[in-house]
Image (cartoon, rainbow, N blue to C red):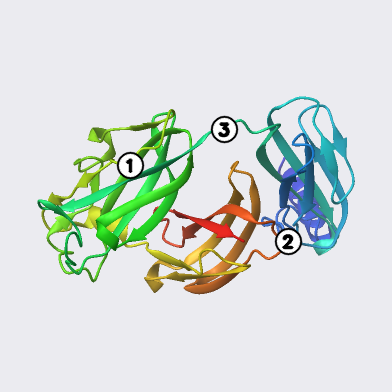
């Protein structure tokens, strides 16, 4: 028995040692190739989706699965779905990196005509009896976060900074249920006097009122800030402040992350239908430019993710 065990160990050693580079599953835990892609609907036919490969590596083969029975081996295929609906599209790549490498990336899309209605949402931010900077300047700057309620949980949807008359506005928001949270930015005259507050005067979303945006524009979603000093939990919501300019833009957008310790590590660009058009991976960037010159004129969202897993922030960008 002891001799058989020694022979078995010797066989395993020789198998692993002489296995060709790149095929050694013990040595290659992290793939050297990465699958990724973007999706764009045809303006003439919303069921016609153009896929663009964004993968990295020495790729020699692409395998697409469109989840409707259709497949493709083209690098940048065009697929026409037979009916409107939500589809899960997956791309598997095969690369010669390190001898052999394969990776798969999947994403969800909606194919078909968009019948979503859009509305405007806004309101005053009150600090005490009067809105900030209204009727005279109080030296405060407000920031408002819009959260889309999905399955009972809030997802970041848009972010705006404002000073004029203490009024925030989110133009052309897709119909749905929303939370709005607002507060004063660091550097405001009364920053330490008021806590970030959910509409209309709640400290957290579990006790906040949902704004139902389905029938008409809402311009009176006023928020009354809660009196009190900031705590650690409060700062987590407002510390990730990103400035995005110019807006509107003719192509390039400059992003600034105000806190270097919370540097941006990924930027996601999506259209009004939620289709991800571009994913930019960066290494602890504090200031960077995003180029949108190749996109058609319209409204887009830029979402940032942080290195410390802070709450992501989305900005609405108008390209003209």
User: 184 or 136, which is in the foreground?
Assistant: 136
Report x, y in % for residue 12. 77, 51
User: 199 or 10, which is in the foreground?
Assistant: 199
| Disc 2 from disc 1: Cα separation | 51 Å
Q: Which mark is residue 282?
A: none
Kindly state the secondary structure of the residue where label 3 is placed.
loop
| Image quadrant occupied by the N terminus | top right
Q: Which residue is mark 3?
A: 116
Question: Disc 2, disc 3: CB below 8 Å?
Answer: no
The image quarter containing residue 164 is: bottom left
Mark 3 or 1 closer to N-term?
3
Report x, y in % for residue 107. 66, 41
The image quarter containing residue 121 is: top left
| Image quadrant occupied by the C terminus | bottom right
Q: Which mark is residue 32?
A: 2
Q: Residue at x 42, y 65 (%)?
A: 242
Q: Residue at x 79, y 60 (%)?
A: 17
Report x, y in % for residue 8. 77, 46
- In the rendered structure, the answer to whether residue 15 lies left or right of residue 85 reads right
Mark 2 or 3 closer to N-term?
2
| Disc 3 from disc 1: Cα separation | 20 Å
Mark 2 or 1 closer to N-term?
2
Q: Which residue is mark 1?
A: 219
Badge 2 local density, few (<14 within 10 Å), some, or many (20+)? some
Badge 3 local density, few (<14 within 10 Å), some, or many (20+)? few
- Nearer mark to the viewer, of 2 and 1: 1
User: 57 or 218, which is in the foreground?
Assistant: 218
Badge 1 local density, few (<14 within 10 Å), some, or many (20+)? some
Kindly state the secondary structure of the residue where label 1 is placed.
loop
Kindly state the secondary structure of the residue where label 2 is placed.
loop
Question: Disc 3, disc 1: CB below 8 Å?
Answer: no
């Amino acid at each position: 028995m002891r001799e058989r065990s020694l022979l078995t160990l010797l066989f395993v050693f020789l198998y692993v040692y002489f296995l060709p580079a790149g095929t050694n599953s013990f040595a290659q835990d992290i793939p050297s190739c990465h699958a990724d892609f973007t999706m764009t609907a045809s303006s003439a036919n919303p069921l016609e989706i153009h896929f663009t490969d964004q993968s990295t590596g020495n790729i020699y083969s692409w395998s697409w699965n469109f989840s409707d029975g259709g497949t493709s081996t083209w690098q940048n295929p065009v697929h026409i779905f037979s009916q409107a609906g939500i589809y899960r599209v997956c791309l598997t790549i095969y690369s010669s990196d390190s001898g052999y490498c394969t990776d798969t990336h999947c994403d969800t899309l909606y194919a078909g005509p968009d019948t979503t209605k859009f509305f405007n949402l806004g309101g005053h931010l009150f600090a005490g009896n009067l809105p900030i900077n209204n009727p005279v300047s109080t030296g405060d700057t407000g920031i408002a976060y819009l959260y889309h309620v999905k399955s009972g949980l809030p997802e970041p949807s848009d972010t705006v900074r404002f000073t004029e008359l203490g009024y925030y506005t989110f133009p052309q928001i897709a119909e749905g249920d929303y939370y709005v949270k607002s507060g004063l930015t660091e550097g405001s005259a009364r920053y330490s006097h008021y806590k970030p507050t959910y509409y209309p005067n709640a400290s957290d979303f579990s006790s906040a009122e949902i704004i139902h945006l389905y029938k008409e524009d809402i311009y009176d979603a006023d928020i009354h800030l809660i009196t009190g000093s900031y705590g650690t939990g409060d700062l987590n919501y407002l510390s990730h402040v990103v400035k995005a300019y110019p807006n509107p833009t003719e192509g390039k957008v400059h992003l600034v992350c105000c806190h270097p310790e919370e540097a941006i590590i990924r930027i996601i660009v999506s259209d009004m239908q939620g289709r991800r058009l571009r994913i930019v991976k960066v290494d602890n960037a504090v200031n960077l430019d995003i180029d949108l010159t190749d996109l058609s004129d319209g409204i887009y969202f830029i979402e940032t993710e942080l290195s410390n897993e802070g709450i992501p922030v989305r900005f609405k960008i108008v390209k003209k």
